[in-house]
């Protein structure tokens, strides 16, 4: 039972961290010194290796 509660706390922490990251993402785009399209491209380009590794 204790392991189940620990997993729930970890899942909640991951959910809150993800929601926080998504919530502050527009601030990073606004503070970026390049345009919004370039920022979006680089965000996708940098995340691509992680997504490919996760899918493999």
Image (cartoon, helix red, strand yellow):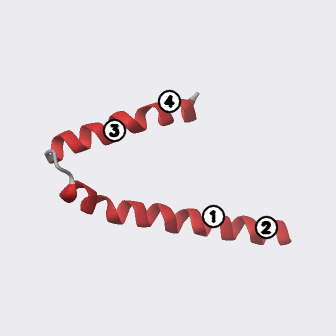
Residue bearing the label numbered 3: 44
Q: Is residue 4 left or right of residue 53?
A: right
Q: Give how far across and how far down residue 36 sits, in percent.
A: 16, 47
Query: Which residue is rendered at x = 46% and y = 31% of the image?
Result: 49
In what element is the residue under mark 1? Answer: helix
Residue 11 is labelled as 1
- Of circles 2 and 3, which is in front? 3
Viewer-proximal residue among 8 and 36: 36
Where is residue 37 drawn, in percent x and y? 17, 42
1 or 3: mark nearer the eye: 3
Crowding at dot 4, Cα within 10 Å, few <14 / some 14-19 / many 20+, comes out as few
Give the position of the N terminus as an image quadrant. Answer: bottom right
Name the quadrant of the C terminus. Answer: top right
Q: Earlier in the sequence, mark 1 or mark 3?
A: 1
Q: CA distance from mark 1 to mark 4?
A: 23 Å
Cα distance in 3D space between marks 4 and 2: 30 Å
Which residue is farthest left?
A: 35
Mark 2 and mark 1: Cα distance apart in space: 10 Å
Please name the residue that numbered disc 4 is placed on: 52
Residue underneath mark 2 = 4
- Is the residue under label 4 in contact with that under label 1 (CB below 8 Å)? no
Which of 48/31 is in front? 31
Instruction: Determine contact: label 3, label 4, CB under 8 Å.
Output: no
């Amino acid at each position: 039972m204790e392991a189940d509660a620990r997993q729930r706390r970890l899942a909640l922490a991951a959910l809150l961290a993800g929601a926080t990251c998504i919530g502050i993402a527009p601030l990073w785009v606004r503070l970026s010194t390049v345009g919004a399209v370039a920022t979006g491209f680089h965000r996708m380009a940098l995340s691509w290796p992680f997504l490919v590794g996760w899918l493999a």
